[in-house]
Amino acid sequence: MKENNRLTKAETQVMNALWSLPNGEGRSADIMEHMPEPKPALTTLLTFLKILKEKGFVESVKMGKAQLFSARVSREAYTRSYMTEVKNTFFGGSLASLVSFFAKSEQLSDEEIEEIKRTIENLKR
């Protein structure tokens, strides 16, 4: 994945479908099964897969008449990169500012607040 190489909403849907498959790989039919409704036309899906290959998110190998598509970037690696960019761009690199923003704007339940506290306490250990 190249620096500042971000996914569009439609590309993210394709990657989420691919990431949901075992080992992050599958044929176009497998990926289509995991696409949200309304599902795109097969030609549209194949166009997005081609774009994702060009961006470095996906690779493919020919298997008979079909192609096996594989995610080259894990969901975790992409999320980490994306959220780091958000933190740096909108919160001056401050994780505390980012967390504070969401804590104030998301109307967290008592259970969610306690879960966040437990997560932070577990990090201290």
Image (spheres, rainbow, N blue to C red):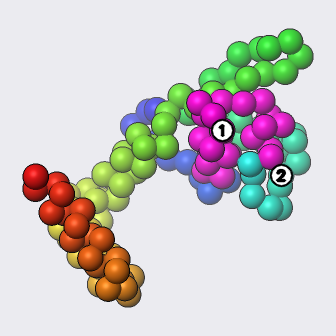
Q: Is residue 2 left or right of residue 9?
A: left
Asked which quadrant contains residue 4, the reply is top left
Name the one closer to the observer, 115 or 63.
115
x 74%, y 48%: residue: 34
Left or right, 122 with respect to 51, comes to: left
> Percent x, y for residue 27?
78, 30
Task: Please state the horizontal and vertical placement of residue 98, each as a whole percent of the image.
Answer: 26, 68
In the image, which residues are magenta? Answer: 12-33
* Element type where label 2 sits in the image: loop
Q: CA distance from mark 2 to mark 1?
A: 18 Å
The residue lying toward the viewer, choosing from 115 and 6, is: 115
Label at residue 45: none
Pointer 2 or 1: first along the chain: 1
Q: Looking at the image, can residue 58 be seen?
A: no
Magenta-span inclusion, residue 28: yes
| Kind of residue at badge 2 | Pro
Residue 15, image x, y percentages = 62, 44
Q: Do callouts 2 and 1 mark residues in contact (Cβ within 8 Å)?
A: no
- Classify 58 as above or below 18: above
For label 1, the crowd category at 10 Å Cα-Cα, with few meaning under 14, some 14 to 19 and many 20 or more, is some
Count neighbours of disc 2 (C-alpha within 10 A) and say few if under 14, some if 14 to 19, many if 20 or more: some
Please state which of the two labelled residues, at mark 2 or mark 1, is closer to the viewer. 1
Find the residue positioned furthest to the left: 124
What is the count of numbered marks?
2
Q: Which mark is residue 21?
A: 1
Residue 74 image point, x, y percent: 48, 37
Asked if residue 111 lies in the magenta stretch, the reply is no
| SS for dot 1 | loop
Residue that label 2 marks: 40
Residue at x 29% of width, y 65% of height: 90
Identity of the amino acid at label 1? Leu
